Amino acid sequence: MSDKMFKELTLRIANATFILACLLYTTVLFNHPYVGIVLENIEGEWKVTFSDPHGESYRSGVRVGDTVIAIDNVDPGAHPSTQKWGEAEGATMLTVKRPGEPLKVVRMVKQPFASVLLSGLPMITLGFVFWIVGLVTVFKRPFLVQARALFWLNWLVGLAIIIAPASSRGLIWARELELISFSLVPVLLVKFISVFSSVYPKWNRLIIRVLYLIATLVFTLLALKIFGVDFTVGLIRKLALSNGLIGTVTVLWYLIVLIKLPSDKPEKNQVALLLAGLAMGLLPFLILTAIPILLNVNPLIDPQVSALFVVIIPITLSYVVVNKSLPDGGEFLELIISSFFYGILTSGILIFYLRAIGIVKRITIETYLSLLSLTIMALVIFNLFKALLHNSVNKILDTHKDYGTKRKNDVLRENLSSMNEGIVVESFANQLGLEEAFVIAEDSEGWYTKSAIGQYLDNTSDQEIMEEYYRRAKYTGHSIETFSSDFPAEMYIAYISNDFTCSIFFGHRSSPVVFESKEIPLLTSMCYQIGQRLKANHIILQLARESKVLEKKTRESQRRSQGLEVINRLLFSNMEEEKKVLARELHDGSLQISLDLNRRMKELITGFATEDNNFHTAVLMQEMIEDLNYELRSICSNLRPSSLRDLGLIPAVEVLFQQVMQKELLVISLEIIGMRREQRLSENIEVVAFRLLQEGINNVVKHSGSSKAIVSIALEDERIELIISDSGKGFDPQMIEDWSLTGNHFGIIGMKERIESLGGEVYITSKIGQGTRIRASIPI
């Protein structure tokens, strides 16, 4: 079995095991009530030292300090769960005595399905998140060592989290598997971080061995406990937690070492993000749960709550493994570190201050850790709020900046437009001998403009008065008016139609010009002409702007097209180079081994008698080896035909067609025009021409259904022309454009683009039921 097949099989078995374990333990949860008490034998009496508020015993009134007289009518010391773990899991009835009160019998009532599901759903979801994230990562990056390492880490963590609710109910092997899993997690975590760089501390292997040793010790103690050797549960739990702490500290220290790499190393940014994710995921659990347990104090909050922060870790790890382009994690890491150290300092000062003013009576580990967690949380929330506020302010400033820039551009355009419009209006006024005029024009499509000369140019108040009159006159349809001396203008002339309006205010009191009534039609006509000239000017400016935009887009499109052509050439060049390397490696490696194996099989066959069963088996194996040799030679020939390299295009094409006709029911007719059989072209031209013919013949075999193909190779006028035609099914030529978008028939489309990138041309003509013809012309 090959290494690849073994890894795939292992992956499938692991996934199946995870799903089966989850279904098994999750199903059993609904049939085993959670008792939730811890017992300790004190002076011959089994005292309750811990009563979980989520347990059935707590709901039934059992509290810390109560004495358990019997479990299922037998001595508590004889109950299996009490013997192994100091618990009462699996019990259906407790006999409890409280000082000053009579004996009380407490029965464990199985909770409704929905209640049990809701209580166990957070941890089940967390476990599935770990597993799914690891599975998605290995599917997206199947060839990365980091992806496989992350999968196994997530698989083990997810399995341990799924088993945790079952272990609290005393189910068989659940507690043991949980402790073993959590003991092995630090080992896989350290190994996962180690694969990110070839540079790692000298003590890395030593730490991994220590972690393996502690995990083995946990496994050994659990095995001995199964066989009746008495070990305290606290010792085993502390060993498992110690392994976790050692692994966590090792990983954090290792990441700190790696983050000192030069800035040009991609591992540096990866490590920054990993460090930030690990810190955010592990610190709440360590501060609120792990450290209090190691110091023999009660956890500050429910472990299930603190464990939910751990979901940050797999998402961060997967993000770093899957994505090649990562954001800068330096600022984020700096925020986490500063919040942590400021939290330690601030909480230390604050707890002594609270002790001095009498709010805190006694400084304890629980008090300090609670204050530390609250302080760090407040600092993180404050920094996040500050970051959000900073981003919001930047957006507002950017918006004002953009608005200011837009306004400047608008002013610039208005000035340019006003200058041209002013020339039009000024020319009109000069023709009439006027010193000031104000023109307003608009159309039904939303275009609106105004222009002033003379004293109206800088007098915005007069312009507003005249605009207000224009709006009223437009509404009433009034087109001619002579004003009194208190109005800014002396005369108003308007041209009004359904889709266009132009109005002119004349101010000629200070000039010797006097208009007569018979000149009104002429003024109206001039008003229309001015409006049309202003509109034409607007259209010209708009077309000029659009022309510049179009010209800019055209240049950008040309640059992108040129860049794509370069990328296309490099892509095909790299593909051919990879094919050449792969063909050489197959020929010099696997094929030579297979030939040697064939030779040795022949020697082995000579040693058997023809009547021997081994003789027939060996002969059969030799035939299979010869088939393998043939297939390997065919693969090498397809990847990089040696005849193309050694003999040239024509001999290579002849060999290709002979091989196709031997395997397929296809007759290929080859015609050579203007080219000698031994004539050589440049390597690039020969490769492109050969690949086109190869792809064309493959399409004839796969799609056309034709029994005959005609191929022509002609050399004339410094160009080589290739033609492939058949009489098969044919197709709709309009589908070719869709192929380039959908990825269908990528081979022939790719060859078409490759030939076009060399300055050549490819024409594909076809008709349904009448065959297909491919013609390519390539400059040499």
Image (spheres, rainbow, N blue to C red):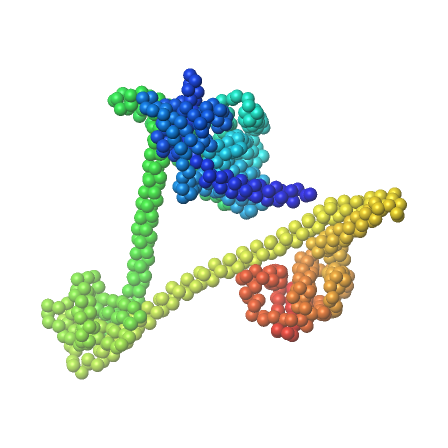
Q: Quadrant of the C terminus?
A: bottom right
Quick one: which residue is furthest to the top in this view?
43
Residue at the spot x=26%, y=77% of the render? 497
| Quadrant of residue 638 within the rendered picture | bottom right
Which residue is at the front of the view, 727 or 91?
91
Please provide percent x and percent y for residue 385: 33, 40
Residue at the spot x=33%, y=34% of the render? 378
Q: Is residue 649 above or below residue 14?
A: below
Residue at the spot x=30%, y=51% of the render? 400
Which residue is at the front of the view, 430 or 546?
546
Residue at the spot x=76%, y=44% of the render? 593
Please provide percent x and percent y for residue 700: 67, 66
| 393 sits to left or right of 758 | left
Q: Is residue 583 above or below residue 677?
A: above
Residue 300 shows in the view: no
Please provide percent x and percent y for residue 290: 44, 28
| Quadrant of residue 405 within the rendered picture | bottom left
Please provide percent x and percent y for residue 493: 20, 75
Which residue is at the front of the view, 410 or 232?
232
Quick one: which residue is furthest to the bottom in this view?
518
Q: Is residue 14 above or below residue 432?
A: above
